[in-house]
Image (tube, rainbow, N blue to C red):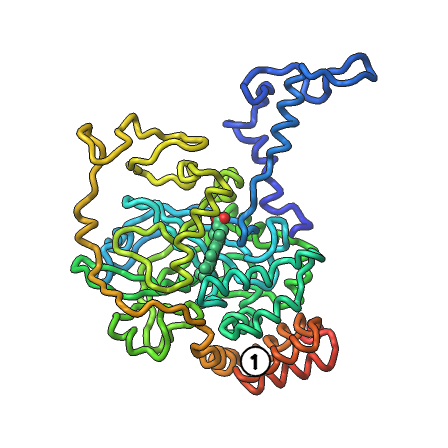
Amino acid sequence: GPLVRDEAAQQLTEYAASKEYGSRGIITNTGGNPIANHDSSVTIGLRGPTLIEDYAMFDQLTHWTHERISERVVHAKGSGAFGYFECTNDISQYTVARIFTSVGKKTPLAARFSTVIYERGSPDTRRDPRGFAVKYYTEDGIYDMVGNNTPIFFTRDVTAFISFIRSQKRNPVTYLPDWDQYWDFISLRPECFHQTIYEHGDRGTPDGFRHMHGFSSHTYMLINADRQITYCKFHYRTNQGVRNLTAQRALQLEGQDPDYSIRDLYNAIHRGEYPSWNLYIQVCTPQQAAELPFNLFDVSKVLPQKDFPLIPVGRMTLNRNPSNYIAEIEQLAFNPAHFIPGIAATPDRMLQARLIAYADTQRHRLGVNYLQLPVNAPHYVKNYMRDGGQVINNQNGAPVYHPNSFNGPEVDPRIAQLFPDRRLCDKIVQIDSIVEDNYQQPGVLYREVFNEQQRQTCANNIAFTLRRCTERVIERTIMELTKIDDDLGRRVSRIVNQAVNPTAQV
Ligand code: HEM
């Protein structure tokens, strides 16, 4: 726990004891020039003003005023680690992706886990989804699998997504979380209820980052050597066992140890208890997808495991903590558009928007050449792009235009041969996706997946914030919950109207 000296608390002691780093050196300025004094400014006499020629002081001061980089617009609070993926089952019948087609093959990776809504310094035990992002450094470049700890997402269209996120962030006047804007939006956009019910169940407050599953959530496309398409969802299942915090314990940790999840991951890896997850896929042919009673490219839906069982692929193990949090975790830049041959996007309209949004925000957050930072850089990159701020790599003077007669790189014909055979032809429309079924799968989750105690916890957790809302928002939310399940609507209504503190019942 945080009140005793845990593994993380030993960091400085370990530094001082290390042979490599732990001998005192001399202090320099940022230019490497030795300085005379680190702790006092150069002044005129004992009580006079500071001299501008005190560059050592200004060097420190002006570095310090630039020491914060923008935080991620979502998923700002988190931590991560490094390790490898080992393929245990060859799935070449579905994909040519080389990380998944030879048993025993190991691919290095980085993983980052996060909460979604609040800022970089916020408590990481809050009720919120957890990001689950994995960067594979493969021989075909970077592959980023940027998922969450939930198999579904709230919205199914990017336009609704943007409002959804704003409604959960701080009210711009009071700068406080605003439960009216939170429940108002959800109750007006009932597609959000599937994940809202999930999040208000026990899994909404996982016990750190090690004890939760991870999901691609979206459906992706796999392509095999015959250019055949199979649709696929990825599932990482924790080998630590699923463990959740009660609502009460999560609230208590917000005060006692707001960095509980970061600490837990760091300490476990430091102790040599390397967390691991087994990777599975669920597959669905285009024919089967056409026959499903829902749109497979709607990220608010699960693909039932009883009809589409999990197929094992391999195991991810994390065995190294970052040695420089800002360089290796804060500057990690995941992008769902980083695919390797054999894996591709589907028409999921949330995913389509994500293919643009990540690189866009990262150019703002980290600068145009952020993919040259060591933690983001692929092993191999050759192209015709150059220049921009903080450039590191000029590709050894290779030509900057194509075609050329000076040995510039050419495309690999293998990749064109994998181009899947697809035809997408329909009328162009702009139709609100709210018309799709919003109630069936959340009802199944509440009635069939949750047990009696979990149903009660879910109702308590919803009421805990809903009871702070204005009458109109409460009424509409309860009406919508009743459409999902009568019993859920009744329970939430009872707790809200009792005006008791719902956490007392958790
Ligand atoms: C982070 C956009 C949906 C998972 C981010 C970031 C943006 C973003 C701009 C910050 C990236 C950065 O600064 O490096 C969007 C948009 C979405 C969407 C526009 C919908 C249209 C989703 C969904 C998932 C997801 C459905 C999960 C299945 C994540 C994760 C991160 C993230 C895990 C943090 C990655 C990290 O650890 O650095 N998202 N997102 N997002 N998003 Fe999304």
Residue 462, horizontal then vertical, whole percent: 62, 73
- On the rendered structure, is 21 left or right of 140? right
Few, some or many residues within 10 Å of mark 1 (<14, 14–19, 20+):
many
Q: Which residue is mark 1?
A: 480
* Residue 293 appears left or right of 153: left
Q: Quadrant of the C terminus?
A: bottom right
Q: Give the quarter of the image for residue 38.
A: top right
Give the farthest residue toward the top: 45
Residue 376 % position (x, y):
41, 41
- Amino acid type shown at disc 1: Glu
Relative placement, left or right, of 108 versus 164 is left
- Count of marks overlaid on the render: 1
Which residue lies at the image location 55% right of the left edge and 57% below the top edge?
Answer: 116
Q: Is residue 3 above or below residue 21?
A: below
x and y percentages locating residue 131 in the rendered image: 49, 57
Image coords of residue 7 (percent x, y): 58, 45
